[in-house]
Image (cartoon, rainbow, N blue to C red):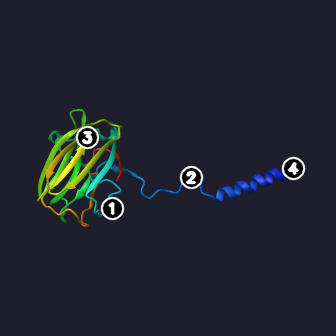
Amino acid sequence: MRNLLLLTLLGLLGLHGCEVPSGKPEDPTAPVTTLYTIKAGNNYADHNDLSFTAKTTLSFRVTFDSSAVYTNKTTENQYDINKLYGFSDCGSQHNTASARFGWNWRDKALRIYAYCYRNGERISEELGTVELNKPTDYQLSIVGGNYIFTFKGKETTIARGCTTVQSNQRYRLYPYFGGDEVAPHDITISITEIN
């Protein structure tokens, strides 16, 4: 009888325990990681819904895996810069005014770039390389009439085409392959926005 009472009591406690959520409630301000996939034969990544932001700084962590290693069909296209993450600017379309990081696989290294459009003119500057499977931090800021790209502790400044700082017309720019060619195989990129 005592064992039956004990089992009944444990059963009731177990059922009651199922009703109480375990752990802490989810923190809505906690960083969210998104795994973007650019499917073979495509340019655009999934998870690229239109998203406006008034932020003037994007801080994020990126991990590239071995899927970032590729060979273009046309040799000179290996120099094309794929797009990583950033935003449009100046209340314009991104091919008129924008800033984002870019990347490509060239000479056995994954190279990172500052990549901008200023009044429709494309501007890029190589910033360095990253290791595969190693999370790396990036920051892109609007400071007055400039974009500040921070990569591996080094700041690179590129002039903007406007001086407007606050704008609710700025939209996020997501991973994109190309250039002139589409992704030769599925490419996955992990991005965690940390601000």
Amino acid type shown at disc 1: Asp
Q: Do callouts 2 and 1 mark residues in contact (Cβ within 8 Å)?
A: no
Specify whether residue 67 is in view: yes
Q: Position of residue 57 (x, y in %)?
A: 27, 55
Q: Position of residue 103 (x, y in %)?
A: 23, 44
Q: Residue at x 29, y 64 (%)?
A: 52
Distance, label 2 to label 1, CA atoms, is 31 Å
Distance, label 1 to label 3, CA atoms, is 30 Å
Amino acid type shown at disc 3: Gly
Q: Position of residue 64 (x, y in %)?
A: 33, 41
Nearest-to-viewer mark from 2 and 1 = 2
CA neighbours of label 2 inside 10 A, class few (<14), some (14 to 19), many (20+): few
Secondary structure at badge 2 equals loop
Sequence-wise, the earlier of marks 1 and 3 is 1
Sequence-wise, the earlier of marks 4 and 1 is 4
Specify whether residue 82 is in view: no
Q: Which of 31/36 is in front?
A: 31
Q: Do callouts 3 and 2 mark residues in contact (Cβ within 8 Å)?
A: no
Q: Position of residue 189 (x, y in %)?
A: 34, 46
Q: In the displayed structure, would residue 108 be above or below residue 45?
A: above
Nearest-to-viewer mark from 4 and 1 = 4
Q: Which residue is mark 4?
A: 2
Q: How many marks?
A: 4
Q: In the displayed structure, would residue 103 be above or below residue 116?
A: above
Image quadrant of residue 156? top left
Does 34 sit left or right of 41 as displayed?
right
